[in-house]
């Protein structure tokens, strides 16, 4: 029964420190994982980086299948004054099926502006999509359902 599976998936999101699973707006469930969300300062700049992994989940009773669509969003911004005034902003999004994604990153900067003593590591992450997707897939399949990654939103 899909309501049992739905509850088990929500419980998985509550018990897992890596991600949350909540009721969705245009899907049955929505998985969310923050890869990095950091604000810091360069020598004469203010920096921000944000990366998020999410998945829309549909539970299709007739097929006993869970449809899973992945979303990766990234945004970064930088504003500085040296060597010349500069303002930049980048934003990207991927929606569909992620076959493989593994990345590590570390950044150093200042936690407070104009405070040399605040220099240090401002963020570090190690992201592997399998660490997020696999627990969901294993739960779905262990309950006798099929797990299917899809490229576009599911419409019944």
Image (cartoon, grey):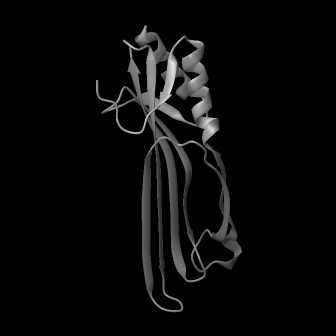
Quarter residue 57 falls in = top left
- In the image, residue 40 above or below residue 130: below
- In the image, residue 94 above or below residue 48: above
- In the image, residue 54 above or below residue 41: above
Quarter of the image with the C terminus in it: top left
Quarter of the image with the N terminus in it: top left
Residue 15, can we see it? Answer: no
Question: Between residues 46 and 75, which one lies in front from this camera angle?
Answer: 75
Q: Residue at x 52, y 70 (%)?
A: 47
- Residue furthest out toward the bottom: 83
Question: Between residues 7 and 114, which one lies in front from this camera angle?
Answer: 7
Query: Whole-percent x and y of residue 44?
Result: 55, 83
For residue 59, side relative to residue 101 (left or right): left
Quarter residue 93 falls in = bottom left
- In the image, residue 102 above or below residue 12: below
Query: Whole-percent x and y of residue 97?
Result: 49, 40
Question: Between residues 66 and 120, which one lies in front from this camera angle?
Answer: 66
């Amino acid at each position: 029964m899909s309501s049992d599976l739905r509850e088990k998936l929500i419980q998985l999101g509550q018990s897992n420190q890596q991600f949350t699973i909540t009721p969705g707006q245009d899907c049955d469930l929505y998985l969310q994982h923050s890869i990095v969300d950091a604000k810091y300062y360069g020598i004469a700049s203010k920096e921000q980086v944000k990366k998020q992994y999410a998945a829309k989940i549909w539970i299709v009773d007739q097929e006993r299948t869970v449809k899973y669509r992945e979303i990766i969003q990234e945004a970064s911004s930088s504003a500085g004054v040296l060597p010349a005034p500069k303002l930049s902003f980048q934003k990207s999004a991927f929606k569909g099926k992620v076959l493989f994604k593994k990345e590590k990153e570390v950044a150093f900067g200042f936690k407070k502006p104009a405070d040399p003593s605040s220099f240090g590591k401002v963020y570090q992450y190690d992201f592997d999509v399998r660490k997020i997707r696999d627990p969901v897939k294993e739960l779905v399949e262990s309950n006798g359902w099929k797990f299917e990654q899809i490229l576009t939103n599911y419409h019944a």
